[in-house]
Amino acid sequence: MHNNTRKPHILIIYTGGTIGMIENPETHSLQPFDFTHLIDNVPKIKMLDYIIENIQFNPPIDSSDMNPEHWKEIARNIEDNFDRFDGFVVLHGTDTMAYTASALSFMLENLHKPVIITGSQLPIGEVRTDGEENLITALQIAAATGINGEPMVQEVAILFENYLWRGNRSTKMSADNFNAFKSNNYPSLAKIGLDIHFNEEVLWRVQAKRPLKVQYEMDPAVMFIVLNPGMTENVLRHQLSVPGIKGIVLKTFGAGNAPTHPWFTDAIHEAVERGIVIVNVTQCVNGGVDTKRYMSGNRLAATGIISGHDITSEAAITKMMYLFGLGLSTTDVRRYFECSLCGEVTL
Ligand code: ASP
């Protein structure tokens, strides 16, 4: 990390999540609370000697309530303040953090500053909270620069406990472990121990630095279909004919395999013929789609569905929302799934 004499300017965007929650005295369940409460619990923040401003969602939300309108609000806050700040820290619930991180990675085109998303498993007011450490480390990462003075991280990333992960490669792996996130098909961007050790070779860099451009339209006409042994033709056809659906992420078995019954492949093929873009993504947390490995995968590929390779479900569904949001044709959406837009897939 390089030491600069100018104080880093960091914007915190507080959306909600466990990190800022308190217990409801009647129901004893956790609910979002305001930013002043959160920041009052982290007096150490002053030791950082940064210029920190904040914006909070009104009201702050549990991330299960996140939707594309909230992603737009986060993106709008980043765009409006992009030139004034060196980096951005988004405080967010863990449940849908990987979806928000993936969505923002597509929406914030030409991003070349850090957008570090973090949260916690225990509320900041609890004695054993992980929130304080996560917030402080996220701020330090958002302020970190390389020897050329450029931001060390120039992408959307998730900081959680001991690791920094690429946002659009991440998945929530645990509902109660402090190391709650992982990117199963991509190395960590940094390891957090006594120091923050960046893995510089795997950090994202834009080819040519262009002004930030935000793509606000995210088309919600997409859905998951998750295969299970015993799925009937009726259930599959019913899901494939949801009115208005433009894209489907089909969550298949193993290396992208699915039943070989003709009724199954016929139903998928007919949906593709009707113009629905179907992307094959494995249900496994690690590894990707390789439809050449088994006959069952081969048959599925012959229906005209496209391979998601090693993309996460979260990145696949938000990439579809983004591509359809751009107003692209079916052919172009299919084509862009064969490209890595911002490091979301290994091809
Ligand atoms: N339900 C919470 C949320 O996602 C969980 C958390 O923050 O860990 O907002």
Image (cartoon, rainbow, N blue to C red):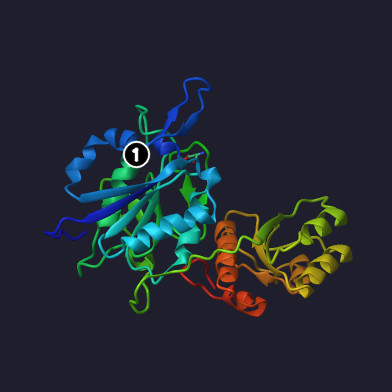
Q: In the figure, residue 21 lies in which quadrant? A: top left
Q: Residues within 10 Å of mark 1 (few under 14, many from 20)?
A: many
Position of 341 with respect to 91 (left or right) is right
Residue 318 visible in the shown view? yes
Residue 153: where, in percent of width, then height?
A: 32, 62
The amino acid pointed to by label 1 is Phe
Q: Quadrant of the N terminus?
A: bottom left
Q: Nearer the viewer, residue 86 or 143?
A: 86
Position of 9 with respect to 298 (left or right) is left
Q: Nearer the viewer, residue 343 or 52?
A: 52
- Residue at image mark 1: 35
Q: Residue at x 22, y 38 (%)?
A: 44
Q: Residue at x 50, y 40 (%)?
A: 62
Residue 329: where, in percent of width, then height?
A: 64, 78
**Mark 1 vs ligand 1: CB below 8 Å:** no
Residue 310 visible in the shown view? no
Examine the rendered structure and indicate whether residue 63 appears above or below residue 170: above
Q: Quadrant of the C terminus?
A: bottom right
Q: Say which element carries label 1.
A: helix
Q: Residue at x 39, y 66 (%)?
A: 202
Q: How many marks?
A: 1
Examine the rendered structure and indicate whether residue 262 appears above or below residue 93: below
